[in-house]
Structures are given as C-alpha cells and as structure tokens.
Amino acid sequence: MADATERQSLAEITAERGWSRRVSDRVDIYLRGPARVRVIWQGDEAISGGSRYHDDGMEQYTRDLATVKGWLTH
C-alpha cells in the first residue's frame, strides 16, 4: 500500500473529528455545523490556499497547510 498523501491524511483526520467533505477536482470543502473550510490543492501534497467561513462569512484566508490543519483539528 502506498503512503498516504497530505490530502488523504487530512481527509481521514477530519472525518474522525466530525467534518463532512465534498470534493470538486482540486478543491476540498469541509463542513461541520455553521463552519466551512475550503482548501484548494496543488497536487496532493501542497495547497494553493485555504479559506475559513462561519455562517457563510469568510473569517480567514491562508496559504499555509499547517494553519488549515489547525482549523480542522481544533
């Protein structure tokens, strides 16, 4: 079995924490209650950017994968 990619690992971690995930090509959208996180990927190991929303209002944007992981795991 091949090693998991960053994208696969993030999907597994978020599923354990109650996030649902929708995938559309390079974009993963994570939903939990009024929170939504949109991640745009460059391949499966790096992101172009991520946005965090609450009640459809954008709160934050980052290009740092560690920041996105923080949003989704805390």
Image (spheres, rainbow, N blue to C red):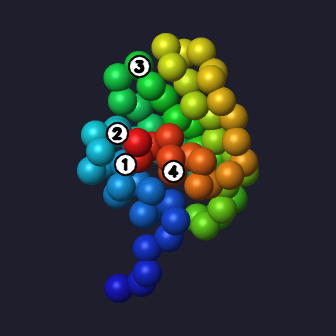
The residue indicated by pointer 3 is: 34
Q: Quadrant of the N terminus?
A: bottom left
Q: Image point 64% across, 41% down: which residue? A: 50
Residue 26 appears in the picture as rendered: no
* Residue plotted at (57% across, 31% down): 52
The type of residue carrying mark 4 is: Lys
Q: Which residue is mark 1?
A: 14
Instruction: Work out whether mark 3 precedes mark 4 in sequence or the reverse, and give the earlier one.
Output: 3
Tag 1 or tag 2, which sits nearer the N-term? 1
Of the numbered discs 1 and 3, the one sitting upstream in the chain is 1
The three-letter code of the residue at mark 3 reads Pro
Marks 2,1: beta carbons within 8 A: yes
Q: Which of marks 1 and 4 precedes in the sequence? A: 1
Q: CA distance from mark 4 to mark 1?
A: 9 Å
Mark 1 vs 3: CB contact within 8 A:
no
First in sequence: mark 2 vs mark 3: 2
Residue 19 got which mark? Answer: 2
Q: Secondary structure at mark 3?
A: loop
Image location of residue 53, percent across then percent down: 55, 24
Q: Position of residue 40 (x, y in %)?
A: 64, 46
Task: State the residue position of label 4.
Answer: 69
Left or right of 38 in this view: 23: left
User: Residue drawn 44% across and 25% down?
Assistant: 35
